[in-house]
Image (tube, rainbow, N blue to C red):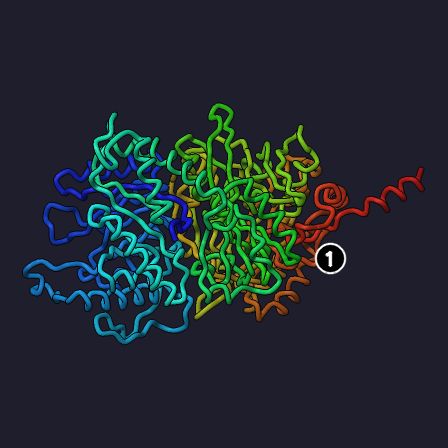
Amino acid sequence: MPDYGHELLFGTFLTPSAADPDRVVTLAELTEAVGLDLTTFQDHPYNAEFLDTWTLLSWVAARTERLRVSANVLNLPLRPPAVLARAAASLDRLSHGRFELGLGAGAFWDGVEGMGGRRLTAGQGVDALREAIDVLRGVWDDAAPGPLRREGTYYPIPGMQRGPAPAHEIDIWLGAYQPRMLALTGQRANGWLPTLEYLRSPDRVTANRLIDEAAVEAGRDPRQIRRLLNVFTVDVSSRNRGFLQGPAEQWVDQLLPLVLEEGFSAFLIGRDDPRLIQTLGEEIAPALREAVARERAGNAPTGRVRSAVSLAKRQPGIDYDALPASLTGRSVEPGDPDYEQVRHSHSWHGSPALVIRPQSAAEVVDAVVYARTQNVPMSVRSGGHGISGRSTNDGGVVIDMSAMNKVEVLDRATRRIRLEPGARWGHVARALAPYGLAMSSGDYGDVGVGGLATTAGIGYLVRKYGLTIDHIVAAEIVTAAGSLLRVDEHQHPDLFWAIRGAGGNFGVVTALELEAYEVGDVAFAQLVVDATDTADVLRRWGRLVEDAPREITSFLALFPARRGNPVTAQVTLVHAGDDVEAAQSALTPFLEIGPILGQQAHLVPYPAIVAPPDDQHRGQGLSDSHSGLLHHITPQAADVMAAMIRSGDVMVMQFRSVGGAVNDVARDATAYAHRDQNFSVLAATVADRRPQLDKLWADLYEHLDGMYLSFESDTSPERLLDAFPEPTLSRLRAIKATYDPDNVFNRNFPIPPADVRRTEEENDHAA
């Protein structure tokens, strides 16, 4: 099989010199800056001239944003697999999925026995490596039941808690040359990582054949194994001085057969030469990618290759083979190793038949068009938090936007920014902070941009600056017809109005442009309050919020009594500004809301209060919730809510202040029409207590006016008018009839399209 169809990767193999550590880090940063994909380092911990490779990998991952990192290769005998598994998963999660595991059987130097090592024959090294791979993957498989236990000659595990899982499916690349090691590569590994100078072309062909044969015998497709290649004797020059020693066009001519005839798809340059690295990134890699694309021209299979076991887990109702070629490398099926990472939202379990992760608006178009043909549920997910449960499903298609996560400042003078929907608000806050800008965006940095910014957006600065949707000036959206539209007050103004409050009903938003505002430091305070007299605490807090200056936004979380502790309120207060005296004056009255059990206050940069946690979305949240809006926390409403939290059937209640700048906006300015209320309230519980929650919520319902739909898990048609009071709902139905007449986007509260024919007949009759 001459070409295995993998996307090309290019990178560096840098010397981890302890004599000049800054230089190796600078070269790694250059590797990223010139557009290369990967940087790697040799691992010889017994060599005093080298930095420790694991420490260097961690440091480089922290100093870069996009670059993948790997050892080339890790010395297994000196890094026991049970420990290595946790270290690898930790680094992968800290780097947001940028670690790969180059692994070798290793070698010992004289005297290693004194450190607990043991010499192994070549055959024993293969067996030890086989055991190690099983341990690594066993530790990473935290979805498997029970602890990891396995017998082993070299790495027995009597009992070990699994996890943490990596942020992505870590590739294991083996540095292998001997037949048994090559066979192991085909049976167990994700990649083969030899060095060009160690193998002549006939030897490389033979090695590939051995890998392929072992893969087939193990029930794997040989295309599941990437072929990587280290190259050391290389240079760029104006004339041909030998193999890979000449101008960029010569490199392309000489690397092309390695891709098309020998199946290599990743090239790592073992020279600490900045000029060579720059030429590789800026000239050679783009030209070779273009040449390979021309030669393949649809002939070589591309995208993920799945085993027979994986294919057997496909679900009925989906035509997997009809998936467009543009999405074959972007899809995750139930049998894929990373399925567990994408199937759930934060709060809800899901079992979708297919998860598509597009990386461009064009791919979103392809995903929508494809999903429409499948006659199964279609969900759209931005960050994956999904309290309402609408961003995953069972047996359907999920369009996961997390790979589209760019944050750009388009024009600092006008404070115009562009956000892709898969970005998380904590990352947005960090990206805007160097410009002195911010955007109010919920109270949790892990929340995705898309869902919040098409619903409303109640954040820590909401009373001062309003909802997130109030700052949207343009958007790009893929409609049910597969059209990519730019919408603003001049282009498709009706759709622009609708997506600000009901965006999930009209398409997949692929980008938003907003006007941010000037924010530097803010005063941030937290109080822990004994809320035994729950109703009184709620009334006091509500009155204080309404009387506070607009710079104050406050959220309150109410927890039931547990293990001898009283009902407790956790109050968060943010003063939108760095005037310490003004903040102190505005915050001090809140100390009177009840018995204070704990308090703290700080002046901090805005990103510090929405820092993104390393959140895993595995359906671990409270899956059943109700949401409503209050004009005021009246004594009657406070009494009902106090009874709810004392019942023991409600796990948490959350209150968010709105009002202020939110209510400056006209009710008909956006599809979010709730411009008179001052508070949002949420009550959540576990699934088996949903009936009790429903009964308690019915008592509160008469005190409510409206709903914040991202927090509501009941999507019954009866709740539509709570989310979209008239005339908003009728206007939305008319727009729905124009842009989504078949109700393709029907998961985000099913707004039924207006019956256009009936409406026309009624108008004719009235005339």
The answer to whether any part of residue 456 appears in the image is no
Mark 1 highlights which residue? 718
Q: Secondary structure at mark 1?
A: helix
Percent of width and height locating residue 643: 60, 64
94 above or below 185?
Answer: above
Q: Residue at x 32, y 58 (%)?
A: 209
Closer to us: 566 or 37: 37
Callout 1 amino acid:
Glu
Q: Residue at x 18, y 42 (%)?
A: 15
Label 1 crowd (10 A; few <14 / some 14-19 / many >=20) = few
Most extreme residue toward the top is 413
- Asked whether, in this view, residue 168 is left or right of residue 560, the answer is left
Percent of width and height locating residue 433: 41, 35
- Asked whether, in this view, residue 537 is left or right of residue 238, the answer is right
Closer to us: 269 or 81: 269
Q: Quadrant of residue 430?
A: top left
- Asked whether, in this view, residue 745 is left or right of residue 102, the answer is right
The answer to whether any part of residue 657 appears in the image is yes
Q: Quadrant of residue 26?
A: top left
Q: Residue at x 7, y 64 (%)?
A: 114
Closer to us: 219 or 635: 219
Q: Quadrant of residue 111?
A: bottom left
